[in-house]
Amino acid sequence: MANKYAVASGLWSATSTWSDTDGGAAGATVPADGDAVFILINVLVQMDVDQSAFIGLNTVTIRGHATTPAMLYWKDAASGWLKIRTAFKLVGTTGAAKGRLLANSNGTWGGTTPMANADKATIDLQTTAYIDAQYLDIALYGTNPTKTSVRTYKDKYDFDGATAVDPTTNIIDLGVAPPAAGTAVMVTTAAGTLPTGLVEDYIYYVRTVSGNTCKLATRNADAQIVDITADGSGTCTLFTGHTDTATGTVNVLDDVTADAPWTTTDLWDRVVLASWNTSSYDQQRLQLTTINAGSLVLSANVDSVQSPGARVVLVSRNVQILSTAVTGVNVVDYQNAATAAGVFRCAIINTAGTGTTFYGTGIYYGTGHTVSGTVSGCSSGI
């Protein structure tokens, strides 16, 4: 184990970046597993190496300065995996301008264009390792998917929003036998308008089934039948919830086959299946194994009956902070910089817990954060 000092701006992988002494001549070997790293003021280092096989570096320090702080960054055209071992941290030093931690498209501080999805930036914090944000400015811009989640279903029933609904009686004619009375359902339309009185992302209950017709209620009782006041238009869809706990395949209403962040590539394929059930807590952390236009295959069988419209939420992003903590670690810790803020268009994921077990806090304290990515697996998100 040794100290390594970044004394010249450049790639992490380049010997011309590194010195064995603080402010010394460049040309040293790049940091090895277990080394402590210091990035000197006015030095900008692009992370372009894969340390996933490391036990982890000792503390990585990004120095602040009055005007020319150091910066560690990721940008397009290169992926990098930074790993910090347990009991150590990623930290800055005091200065009017704090040390900078950046991921974006061009590696220029202040740029807000996300890092291209094809390129990956990972900060891997082992067990008790964390990011001490007291003296760090953090701006992590990953690529968000067009659809952050997709809706699941068991069976769906298409009907014409203009002709299959009778606003005077509230009857809907599905053209086939409806689900049994009391079944929870949702309604949607891809290219039309729902009949007035019905809304998307709301659980209704099938009532007064007769032949191919039914009514919908806001509760499982005839006293709460929805008052449909006007026809809709186009094709509308009524759908039920997934019920099969012997499969990991779920039907989905939303096609994400062309949405690049949705992938089956290991480590960037994490999802959460979250049910809308109002009577019980219901989530399952999984990975994607197959992505089809009308279905997703998950890494394990669905573990419970799902409400209609239960969501498969894409948790992974191409820019990610991972924590393996099994205690109350604050992954990004602002407790000594309570008025500081960061940009987190990235994933913050605790990977240690399963089922109903969660650990740590994603972002602890701070004011005015921009969080447009995900926080998952933590006891508290923010």
Image: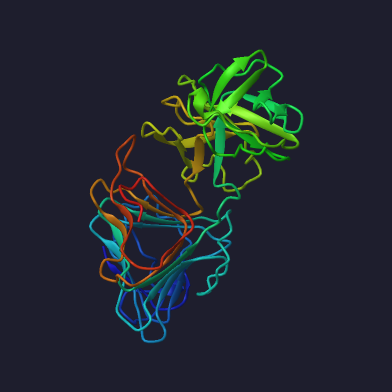
Looking at the image, residue 202 sits to the left or right of residue 21; the answer is right
Q: Which quadrant of the structure image shows residue 15?
A: bottom left
Residue under the image location 41 percent in, 26 percent down: 303
Looking at the image, residue 88 sits to the left or right of residue 372; the answer is left
Q: Is residue 127 above or below residue 296?
A: below
Q: Is residue 336 above or below residue 268?
A: below
- The answer to whether residue 71 shows anywhere in this view is yes
Q: Residue furthest top?
A: 211
Between 225 and 13, the one nearer to me in the picture: 225
- The answer to whether residue 296 shows anywhere in this view is no
Q: Where is residue 259 in the image (x, y as percent from the top left)?
A: 63, 46
Q: Where is residue 76 in the image (x, y as percent from the top left)?
A: 57, 63
Residue under the image location 69 percent in, 39 percent down: 190
Q: Which quadrant of the structure image shows residue 25?
A: bottom left
Residue under the image location 73 percent in, 26 percent down: 164
Q: In this view, does 363 lie above or below 235?
A: below
Between 6 and 325, the one nearer to me in the picture: 325
Q: Which quadrant of the structure image shows residue 41?
A: bottom left
Looking at the image, residue 244 sits to the left or right of residue 53; the answer is right
